[in-house]
Amino acid sequence: MKTMTNLKDIWTVAKFTMKDLIGRKSFRISTIIILLLIIVGFNVPNFLNSINGGDFSETILISDPENVFDNQLEALNTLDPNYKYEPVDLNADEIKAKLEAGDASSAVTIEKTSDNIKITYITENTAMLTGFPTGLMDALSSLYTSIQIQKLNLSDKQLASLSPNFEFELRQTEDQNIGGNIGVMLILSCVLFFAIYFCAFQVSSSITTEKTSKIMETLVTSTSPRTIILGKTIGIGLVGLGQVLLFSATAIICAKLCLDAELLNAMLDLSNFTPYLAIITIVYFILGYFAYALLYALTGSTVSKPEDIQSANTPVVILTMIGFYLSYFTLTNPTGELNVFASLLPISSPFCMPLRIMMGLANGWDVALSIAILLVFCFIVARIAIKVYSNAILNYGSKMTLADIVRTYKQK
């Protein structure tokens, strides 16, 4: 009966927190702004398309007065659709005038010396270039080689021997059941990072703000600190999850309307996602958010003034960045010891373990151990946050140090 009452109190605080957060003008305005940014961001290609008349290619002038390429420079346009190569018969001053007038983004001049072919790349600003553009270099080399091969009058068999059909295959040492899509998993990691960074932060902000208001007097006299901490964490978590789902749904709809369907289907391919992988991913998402939300609750309990929140939250922000980037660094060596360590470390396991499961590198015991460590971590952080919060309610004047937190937790 007592457990049911506690759960009811927690849910009451959660509902109050959700109503308060959604009712804030700043929350509604920021949500609308982010939605507009998502819509505008996905429609940027359409805006550019309407401005440029559907032509995104950059024009490159090519001058070949000695006809080194046998009037075949037009073939360059089939090699790279992002560039439009325009053969011209202009001198250096005329090319400069066209570039300054904006008729082309750059130009190439070709001349034959004794044993070499000199190719000069001309642009108005070379500050961002570290050398001759690699793509253009490869295209010109490939075209020139093709022209010279045609002049040799080789048989079909000889031509085939110059460009054999290579068959490349990627294989790993063990047969492992890989399900899912790495791109989707990385997107989910980014969504989790967004939820932690922007939504869990609200936990510390809410706790600190209400410590200095009359709302706290009502809460303290009607319920326990544990109920307040857990209720606020759950309430803000639900609002944050709803906000993330709204942003994700908007992004998916905009992507379907604005991006190439084939590219989008390849990026968001969920056909290989197994139910096990989907469930585990959701579990880690919830536990990961809850762990960091409790950390923010702890930092929010240590300060009494809203202006101190940013500095108090810095350690948690650093931990979030470390956990997030570990999931990317370990992708370079998925079977390495760092990957195993990161999938067990509670600050990084929500980001790393779903990727390891998808790659078939984690068995059931690995997953169970990782979740157990994450649950213990959440339990410990929750106990510390509740203890610190209950002792810091009347601490209006100063920020608690690490020594104060340790001393507070040791007190009976």
Image (spheres, grey):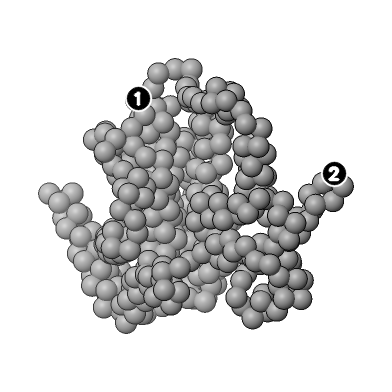
Q: Nearer the viewer, residue 12 or 273?
A: 273
User: Which residue does the numbered mark 1 point to in the structure image?
Assistant: 177
**From this viewpoint, which residue is outermost toward the top?**
174
Determine whether, in the image, residue 9 is placed left or right of residue 387: left
Q: In the figure, 369 relative to 112: above or below?
A: above
State the residue position of label 2.
Answer: 115
**Mark 2 residue element:** loop
Residue occupying the far right of the picture: 114
Question: Residue, x 48% and y 66% (percent of image)?
Answer: 56
Q: Residue 85, labelled with which disc?
A: none
Along the viewing direction, whichever of 32 and 157 lies nearer the viewer: 157
| Residue 211 locus on image (x, y percent) | 40, 73
User: Picture coordinates of residue 20 (x, y %)?
Assistant: 27, 75
Query: 10 Å neighbourhood of mark 2: few (<14), some, or many (≥20)?
Result: few
Mark 2 or mark 1, which is nearer to you?
2
Q: Amino acid at mark 1?
A: Asn
> How busy is the neighbourhood of tag 1: few (under 14 within 10 Å), some, or many (20 plus)?
few
